[in-house]
Image (cartoon, rainbow, N blue to C red):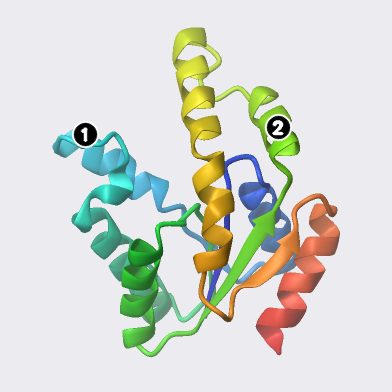
Amino acid sequence: MIVWVNGAFGSGKTTLVEELRGRWPEALVFDPEVVGYVLREIVDVPTGDFQDLRLWRRQVAEFVVGLVEEYRRPVLVPMTLVNSSYLEEVFGAIEAADLTVHHFFLKVPEDVLVARIDGRSFTPDAPEQDERVRRWCKERIAACTAAIDTLPADTVFLDGESSPGELAELVLRRAAG
């Protein structure tokens, strides 16, 4: 089984997955950004967004499927994925392997997202890079918010302002049921 935690940058995906990992020790954590970072080292990413690379989408799906098939453990995936065709492509490949994807989306008001992004340090030793990353994250808030209406019907929406513990309980109950 895969538990995909989706939402805008700053919505609390990683925090929720860390909380889940503490309560579900057999679960593996896979961050698809790592695949993107590797691809950036090898090929040019013309748009600046590695999700636009078909190879990223294919590798993410294959990696998740491989983790479940090889280790027979649930996989927790914290990743913003709001382009509906990309989401269909990735989830479709996972489901084609006869695996279940529990899809959760953290809803957080824009002002809270901006405050969270502004409060983070992505590259502490490189303030200019840090600001570029913050700007990139903020520029994507509108697309993430707009995507809410295009997500799969079985998406479970969570109040991203709830505590990580409360959210983890909801996710665990839903994934178990």
Q: Look at 29% across and 60% down and name the residue there.
A: 57
Where is residue 139 shown, x and y percent of the image?
50, 32
Q: Dot 1 corresponds to which residue? A: 41
Q: What label does residue 162 carry, if any?
A: none
**Dot 1: within a 10 Å radius of its alpha carbon, few (fewer than 14), some, or many (20 or more) residues?**
few
**Element type where label 1 sits in the image:** helix
The answer to which image quadrant residue 167 occupies is: bottom right
Nearest to viewer (mark 2 / mark 1): 2
C-alpha span from label 2 to label 1 = 29 Å
Residue beneath the point at 29% across and 69% down: 62
Q: Is residue 173 above or below residue 53?
A: below
Quadrant containing the C terminus is bottom right
Q: Are marks 2 and 1 in contact (CB under 8 Å)?
A: no
Amino acid carrying label 1: it is Glu
Q: Residue at x 64, y 30 (%)?
A: 117
Residue that protrudes farthest toward the left in the picture = 43
Amino acid type, label 2: Arg
Q: Badge 2: how crowded within 10 Å, few (<14), some, or many (20+)?
A: some
Disc 2 secondary structure class: helix
Is residue 173 shown above or below 138?
below
Using the image, tell me which numbered label, if any, was put on residue 116: 2
Q: Is residue 105 left or right of residue 49?
A: right
Front one among 52 and 67 = 52
Q: Position of residue 64 (x, y in %)?
A: 39, 69
Q: Is residue 4 left or right of residue 109?
A: left
Residue 85, image x, y percentages: 34, 65
Give the image quarter of residue 95.
bottom left
Determine the residue positioned at 40% across, 53% down. 32
**In the displayed structure, does residue 168 sit left or right of residue 52?**
right
Residue 164, given in percent of the width and then of the height, sits at 79, 54
